[in-house]
Image: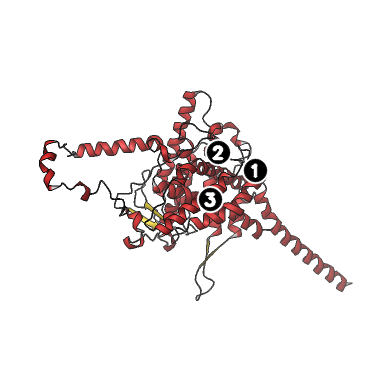
Amino acid sequence: MTSLLLKCFVLLAISLLLDAKNGSKSQPSACFCKLQGEVDDCSCKVENLDSLNNRKVYPVLKSLLQRDYFRYFKVNLMKPCPFWSDDSRCALKDCHVQSCTEDQVPEGLKGHKNEREPNKYSKEAQKEEPNCNEERKLGALDRTISAESMEAFKNWTQHDDKQETFCEIDDEYTPDCQYVDLLLNPERYTGYKGASPHRIWKSIYEENCFKPEKLVYGSKKSLAGSMEGLCLEQRAFYRLVSGLHTSINLHLCNEYLFPAKNLLSAPEFGPNTEEFIRRFDPKPTKGQGPQRLKNLYFTYLVELRALVKAAPYLEEEDFFTGNPEEDKDVKEGVKDFLEIIKSFPDHFDESKLFKGDPKVAEKLKTEFREHFRNISRIMDCVGCDKCKLWGKLQVQGMGTALKILFSGDRIGLESTVNAHHKQRFQLRRSEIVSLFNAFGRLSSSIQTIEKFRKLTS
C-alpha cells in the first residue's frame, strides 16, 4: 500500500512538473496575440508585412547597409542636453562609441570632389588670370561679407530647415561632428539603465507625445480603449513613437549582454527570452506588451511608404564614396530594393492625415512637427554614447520619412518626390543614411519577432 502511494505521488509530481514546463513554454505566445489582422488605422495586415519583410526586404536591406555609403554616419555626440544638466554619463565600456580616424573614412565622404569634375567653388577655380586683372578690377563685385551677415545667413538657413524638417540635424561642419562606422558600433544592450533612460522616455511620452490624458508613462494602466479620445493624427504620432521604442527594446532583447560564465570566458551577446517576456508579455505589462509589438508594424509602414514616395529621387542619387565600382553596386542594389517595396500593394496613405478645416489641420501639423523636433533634441540628453548614436540616427530617419511624406506638390499614394525639383525638395546625405538605417532597424526588429516566436514556442 505504501509502495503504491509512493508511486502515485511520484507520477503526480512528474505530471505537475510537465504541466508547469509546458505552461511556461506556451505562456510567452501571448506576447504575439495581437500580431494578426490589420495594423491599427491601416488596411495592411500584419501577416503580409511579416512575409514582405522576412522573405524579401530584410535580406536585401541587410546586405545593402554593409556598404560604405550607408555604414559611415556623421554625428555630434558632444552636444549638451538642452533640457537638464547631463549628470548621468555612462561609464560602462559598452556605452563607448569608436569614432573613425581620417584615413578610415572613404575619400568621397570627406568632401573631396571627383577629379574629373572640378569644383567651381574651390580656391584654385577662383584664381585670377594675370592678363585679366585690370578687367576684373573694373567689373569686380565687393565679395567681402561681414560677421553680422554671416550670422544672419546661418539664422536664415536654420529657419528654412525648421520649416521643412521634422527633426534637428547636426551641423556636419562643427569639429565635434565625427564619422562613426555603424558596423563597428552596433545597437545592442550596453548596461545603460535606471533613472537616466527612464527620464528620457518619460520626457518623450509625457511632454512631447500626444497621448491619452490620464495615461502616465511607467504606469501599469492598460491602454485598452484609451486611444479613443485621440484624433487620427495624434494616434499616428503616439504609435510612431511607441513603435520606435518597441524596436529599440527588441534590439536590446536580441543583443543582450550575458555575463562571463567563468574567469576564463568573456561576456557574450545573444537573445534573452526572459527579457523579451518581461517587456512584451501581457502579464508583466498589464496588457500593453502585445500592443507595443503591433505599433512596430505601424512605424514600419510609415517609413516604408516614405521610401516608396522618395523612390524617383533615390533612383537618381549617385551614392558617391569615391569608389566607382562600389558606388555602381550600391546604386544597383538600391534600385533592386526599391523595386521590391514598390511592388507591395498595401501602403500607408498619408493623405488621410491633416484633413478637415485647413486652419485646424495646419495647427495640428505644426504641433506634430514641433513635438517631433523636440524629441530629436531630447536624444542629446541620452547618457550612453552608443544609445545616443542609435537614438539620434533612428529619430532622424523617422523625421526624414515624415519630411518626405509631407513634401511635394501633393500627398497621397500616387504622389512622389524626385530629383528634378531640388529647389523645392532635397535630401542631405545624412538624411538618406539615417532613413535607410532607421528602416533597417525596423526591418531587423520584425525579423527578431519571428526569432523570439520560435524561441518561446
Residue 181 seen in this snapshot: no
Marked residue nearer the N-terminal end (3 or 2):
2
Question: Residue 416 appears at what percent x and percent y?
Answer: 49, 37
Residue 215, numbered label: 2
**Is disc 3 surrounded by few (<14), some (14 to 19) or many (20+) residues within 10 Å?**
many
User: Quadrant of the image for the N terminus?
Assistant: bottom right
Q: Depth check: 219 or 28 in front?
A: 28
Question: Residue 308 appears at what percent x and percent y?
Answer: 52, 43
Residue 45, numbered label: 1
Marked residue nearer the N-terminal end (3 or 1):
1
Q: Mark 3, mark 2: which one is toward the viewer?
A: 3
**Is disc 1 surrounded by few (<14), some (14 to 19) or many (20+) residues within 10 Å?**
some
**Is disc 2 surrounded by few (<14), some (14 to 19) or many (20+) residues within 10 Å?**
some
| Helix, strand or loop status at disc 3 | helix
From what the image shows, is residue 324 above or below residue 243? below
Q: Depth check: 279 or 3 in front?
A: 279
